[in-house]
Image (cartoon, helix red, strand yellow):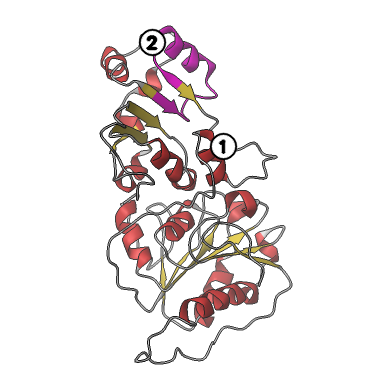
Amino acid sequence: MVRCGKPVTASNNLRRLIIRPGGIGDCILSLPAIEHLGTADAEVWVPSAMVPLIRCVEARSIASTGIDLLGLPGVDPPAPLVARLRLFDSIVSWYGANRAEFREQVRALGLPFQFLDALPDSSAKIHAADFFLKQVGGAGSAVPRIDCGPIERGDFAVIHPFSGRARKNWPLDRFRELAMRLPMPVRWCAGPEEILDGAVRIEHLYELGGWLASARLYIGNDSGITHLAAAVGTPVVAIFGPTDPAVWAPRGERVAIVQARTVDEIGVDNVLEAAGRLYKHQNGGSRHKHESDPPEDPFKAGTDLLTHDFGIAGQKKDE
């Protein structure tokens, strides 16, 4: 579940609606901002896939509300929707910020909307999670956290070789070579419409998060599922091409980024080195005396590409 960043108290009783559209990654990076906005009587409207991840307040899918009908030419505002929106003292919305007709409609209805930019400006140098938190009056490093309950860590790695855009996808043949060279069993992960024989497919994001949390390592492209893996605490190696990881890297306790100008420039050894760094961090210095030593590090280094460790605060750390 989303771990709320501040306790809900009786005095914090503003009736607030929070509307957050977007992809899985964008929504996960917005979780600290949503938590900051939370009140004792808050409600969140998000894309259908995200509803299971919002667990500290009531959540609805945007598609189920009919809000997309507001502002359409020749379409009267649905009376039940307007009546529901009038129940709120405050409506903070990343939805509709770029739809002038939508904004005009809610102004004409006298609804208490506050519109926020759904994405940072392309020239932004602030991490997206910090940007979203700052929009709503928060401060500091924003780290999304999704608590899936007590999970026993297994001895396997998860590879999800897809993303929302082809240019973000590391070649599948390199993922396959990587899988053969990893020193642990590999389980492949895919979405319902992604073609990959033998892959684990879990459409319910909270259940998928629980399964990812049980992995010793996750490796994937710049995708929403990579953000989910980081948010549930799995050690993550994220492969980035032209997207700026200083703005869009997943955040978590153990996150490493491998980046080049294009993903085609990244070799298998580059990703193995990043995985090895996470392996050493995970197995070094925290064992009890009765635990056996971890196996000799089987990962092979050899890279001159840009490899960052973004740590828990999402800031690059020097080795």
Q: Is residue 72 visible?
A: no
- Residue 244 x %, y %: 65, 51
- Residue 305 x %, y %: 71, 68
Q: Nearer the viewer, residue 183 or 112?
A: 112
Along the horizontal axis of the image, is 205 left or right of 282?
left
13 over 86 or under it: above or below: below
Residue at 29% x, 31% y: name it: 11
Element class at badge 2: loop
Q: Quadrant of residue 35?
A: top left
Question: Callout 2 environment at 10 Å: few (<14), some (14 to 19), or many (20+)?
Answer: few
Where are the magenta residues, as a range? 91-113
- Residue 221 x %, y %: 54, 59
Residue at 74% x, 72% y: name it: 304
Residue placed under numbered mark 2 in the picture:
75
Q: CA distance from mark 2 to mark 1?
A: 28 Å
Residue placed under numbered mark 1 in the picture:
119
Amino acid of disc 1: Leu
Q: Quadrant of residue 6?
A: top left
Q: Earlier in the sequence, mark 2 or mark 1?
A: 2
Residue at 35% x, 12% y: name it: 77
Q: Quadrant of the C terminus?
A: bottom right
Along the horizontal axis of the image, is 179 left or right of 62?
right
228 over 150 or under it: above or below: above
Q: Residue furthest front?
A: 11
Circle 2 or circle 1, nearest the eye: 1
Residue at 40% x, 31% y: name it: 19
Element class at badge 1: loop
